[in-house]
Amino acid sequence: MPRAFWVYILSSRSRALYVGVTGNLAARLEAHRAGRGGIHTTRYRHRRLVYAERFEAVVDAIRREKEIKGWRREKKVALVEGLNPEWRDLAEEDLG
C-alpha cells in the first residue's frame, strides 16, 4: 500500500481555521486534540477535521498546503463548504 500524505483543515467551534500537512492523519489529529498540536491549535482549540486531501507524494502535499495557507479566509471557507457544507467532523468518517 503506497504511503499517503494529507493536507488538512481543522476548525474550532468559532470556525477559526488551521491548515496543516502530515503523513499520519490519525496520529496528527490525536496530537491536536490532546493539546500537543502546536501553539496555534492549542490556543484556538482546533479540534474538528473539516477538510482533508490525500496525496501520494509529500512534495505535492506541501505545495498544496502552502497554496491553501496563502488564500484569504473566504476562499478557505469555500473549499471546506464545497466538500463539507455542514462542517461535520470528518475524523468520524472513513477517509481511506
Image: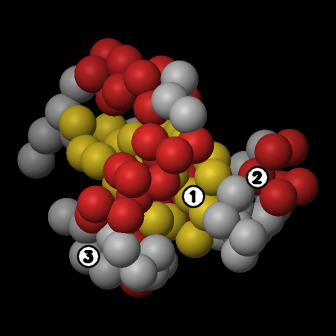
Residue at (23%, 36%) from the top-left corner? 55
Secondary structure found at label 3: loop
Left or right placement of residue 20 versus residue 59 in this view: right
Mark 1 or mark 2, which is nearer the start of the sequence? 1
Q: Which mark is residue 10?
A: 1
Residue 14, percent from left and from top: 73, 70
Mark 2 near mark 1, Cβ–Cβ under 8 Å? yes
Residue at mark 3: 94
Left or right placement of residue 89 versus residue 35 in this view: left
Label 2 crowd (10 A; few <14 / some 14-19 / many >=20): many
Residue at (48%, 37%) from the top-left corner? 21
Residue at mark 2: 41
When the figure is inspected, residue 26 is found, relative to residue 18, above or below; the finding is below
Residue 86 visible in the current orientation = yes
Colour pattern? secondary structure
When the figure is inspected, residue 46 is found, relative to residue 90, above or below; the finding is above
Q: Nearer the viewer, residue 22 or 51?
A: 51
